[in-house]
Amino acid sequence: MADEDRQKVVLGSASAMHVAIERPGFRALVNDEMASLILPRGTGCIIGKLFAKFGPARSISPEDQEEGDRIASQSVAGLINRYWGEYVACFLQPRGVTILRDPGAACPCYYLRLVDGYAIASDISLLVEFKFLRPHVAWDQIPRYLSAKDLPFEHTGLQGVRELLAGTTLTVSNDRAEIALAWSPWDHVERDAPPESEDLPARLWRTVHQCVRSAVSDIDSGLLMLSGGLDSSVVASCLAGAATQISAMTMVSSDAYGDERQYAQEMASHQGLHLHEHHYSLDDIDLSKSVAARLPKPVAAIHELALYSAVVRRCREIGASAVITGNGGDNVFYNSSSVRPFFDRLKDDGFSVGAFHTFNDICSITRVSSGKALKAIASFALRPRHEYVWERETSFLDAALTASLRKTTYDHAWLSSPPGAAVGKLGHIAFLLRMQNHIEGYLRSDDLPVINPLTSQPVLELALAIPTWRQFEGGINRSVVRRAFQQHLPPLILDRRQKGSPGGFALSIIEAKATEIRERLLDGELVRRRFLDGGAIDHALRQGPAIGLGYMRLLSFLDIEAWIRNWEEGQTNAP
């Protein structure tokens, strides 16, 4: 690549690129399928889909210069306050550029420091393709993925590659770079708190409905992942009457806990959707392939290969151009069993009848006695509540690594709560962080965007404004959501409390491929570099069906091993 091409670059999400905007020291490239709104007078561009918070349920057209003028005049703050979407925004200044990633984390954004600038991409493979990056595993970051893979972090698992986190800006000026928080969840906990007189369920229904309809407005056909759980059913109900052609799909495993067809069929029938039923297959599991092969961070578990392989096949069979999910709903609507909401109720109402009701609600949801609940509340009350300590997973880790992790602090700007903040909201915000590494979607390499409407910025902001204890009312989890959609869901779905799981299928992988798993883990890099305790893994594998919940950790380790080999050997093709 010529020297003049090695400048600050913003890249789209496919290899067929064209120049969207260019000026000295800056070039933005996008693929033909990716929308880009060019701001007037060359002041910047918005790459991706953008929607007005208060407007029709459709994306803003690249030809809509009135919106472009408005965004250019208001810059970052105006974009965040008036719009939402799946985007990375670029604002050009006389001596630099500011890059903003959307607060919902829908559009990936990775960046790399060059000798003479920065390269920024929504697909890490582009940094390799454009020869900006020769990928090498950042071994010092691997322990974090082994112990806290759900926490978004600026440093990735590849040397030199960083992630621009959700709602954050990167400003490059005079060869200096500065990271700043442009959107904070705490701004919506108090500022947007709905008044008691407001019909909150109705407002939530309108917001979710608008976001779902907007998110699918640009696709001709979509495949909805429908488990029959509350979240996917909420999304399904919002698709009624949409111009987009929708089919539904549910995954089935051989055990009763993994067979949710009764619920999926009920919801599909209610909505008039054709439902495709697919069984998880061991034939789709290749232990040499990582689910996260095209990501710069090892955040997956290898049993997910079966899900994504089945989804790709079905989309190709029916011609679907996108996958639609209810992912993130548990996080956004705080489906928790914590005692934190009790303290939020005390903060709002003091020791009142309402606080007593919230206490009973927590007992009902957690299915514990009042004595056990009181003990948990007393234990929590003794903790320092000014900070959130991110729990580490240390099972199967080498003893020396475990000891060193005790001295390490994992943090995120969103976890820095203001004085007097509601402790339940701190837990809620931690829930929001836990979903971000997993909503990017593993199907981009198959040109299948994954649409997660429940993680949209307007839904996030309203959910943050709802007091945590209101999501527990009546001893029912996600109570406000259920009330919001009670006229749109069949009783079987509305009253459902249990969730299904592919755990039975995941365990069958351990049983069916025990010999290969043993070889890959015990002879792998993670044991060789003393990240994992080979003896503990060997003992667990000898347990067979009695292995317990440890099998999920092993499946995660297997994906990390495959991810390491994919990058170290240059095999970055997605599964």
Image (cartoon, rainbow, N blue to C red):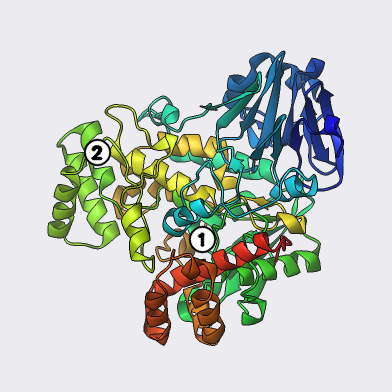
Q: Where residue 167 sits in the image (x, y, percent)?
A: 55, 33
- The three-letter code of the residue at mark 2 reads Arg
Q: Residues within 10 Å of mark 2 (few under 14, many from 20)?
A: some
For this rendering, which residue is in front, 291 or 157? 157
* Vertical relation: 98 (above or below) 486: above
Instruction: Using the image, tell me which numbered label, if any, was put on residue 385.
Output: 2
Q: Residues within 10 Å of mark 1 (few under 14, many from 20)?
A: some
Q: Where residue 548 sits in the image (x, y, percent)?
A: 37, 77
For this rendering, which residue is in front, 79 or 264? 79
Q: Where residue 57 sits in the image (x, y, percent)?
A: 69, 36
* Residue drawn at the location 82% of the way across and 27% of the way down: 21
Residue 8, quarter of picture: top right
Secondary structure under tag 2 reads loop
Residue 206 visible here: no
Structural distance between the alpha carbons of marks 1 and 2: 41 Å
Q: Quadrant of the C terminus?
A: bottom right
Secondary structure under tag 1 reads loop
Choose the circle earlier in sequence order: 1 or 2: 2
* Vertical relation: 470 (above or below) 54: below
Q: Nearer the viewer, mark 1 or mark 2?
A: 2
Residue located beneath label 1 in the image: 490
Instruction: Using the image, tell me which numbered label, if any, was put on residue 295.
Output: none
Residue 172 visible here: yes
- The three-letter code of the residue at mark 1 reads Pro
